[in-house]
Image (spheres, rainbow, N blue to C red):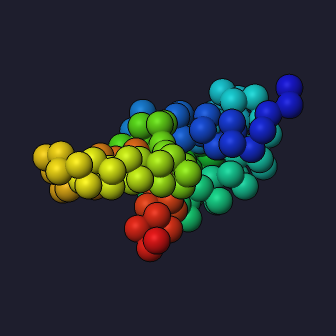
Amino acid sequence: MELKKSSITADILNLLSDNKVHTLQEIADEIEISKMTVRRHIQSLSYRYPIQTFCGGINRGGVYLDKDYIYQGKTLSIDELQIINNALSLLQKQNANVDQKLLHSLLNKFSLPSNKESFYEQ
């Protein structure tokens, strides 16, 4: 089965979001990819998400997503964030009562970590 990188990434994050420790082999079997592919994706994901790995004896090593992090699986792209920001600007110009703190909180909730940084730099 041909899987796209983004699909594999989403599948791994969804699996890890159960707050349990998983072995690389468990993840590979669940998603139907090789253990080496899982290892590469976990390494890449660990730069953007609080994924922890640890080594151990046979069947003792594992991977888990930090229990304080909530992966919701639904995120906004830079383009989507920009559209929302433009709409909010229009609302403010019409003197609509808009709670800025709440809006920023909502945008943060549904933005990928990398998108948050680049969006707020604009």
- 105 vs 66, left or right, is left
Q: Where in the figure is residue 10, as x and y percent of width and height?
A: 60, 38
Q: Where in the figure is residue 100, as x and y percent of width and height?
A: 20, 56
Q: Is residue 106 above or below residue 47?
A: above
Residue positioned 46% across, 64% down in the render: 119
Residue positioned 56% across, 51% down in the render: 79
Residue 16 in view in this figure: no
In the picture, the quarter occupied by the N terminus is top right
Q: Is residue 2 above or below residue 88?
A: above
Front one among 92 and 106: 92
- 21 vs 101, left or right, is right
- 24 vs 68, left or right, is right
Q: Residue furthest front?
A: 94
Q: Where in the figure is residue 56, as x and y percent of width and height?
A: 55, 55
Residue positioned 53% across, 33% down in the render: 15
Front one among 115 and 40: 115
- 21 vs 89, left or right, is right
The total number of labels drawn is: 0
Residue positioned 54% across, 55% down in the render: 78
Q: Where in the figure is residue 80, as x and y percent of width and height?
A: 51, 46
Front one among 78 and 83: 83
Q: Is residue 3 above or below residue 96?
A: above
Q: Residue furthest bottom?
A: 121
Residue 11 in view in this figure: yes
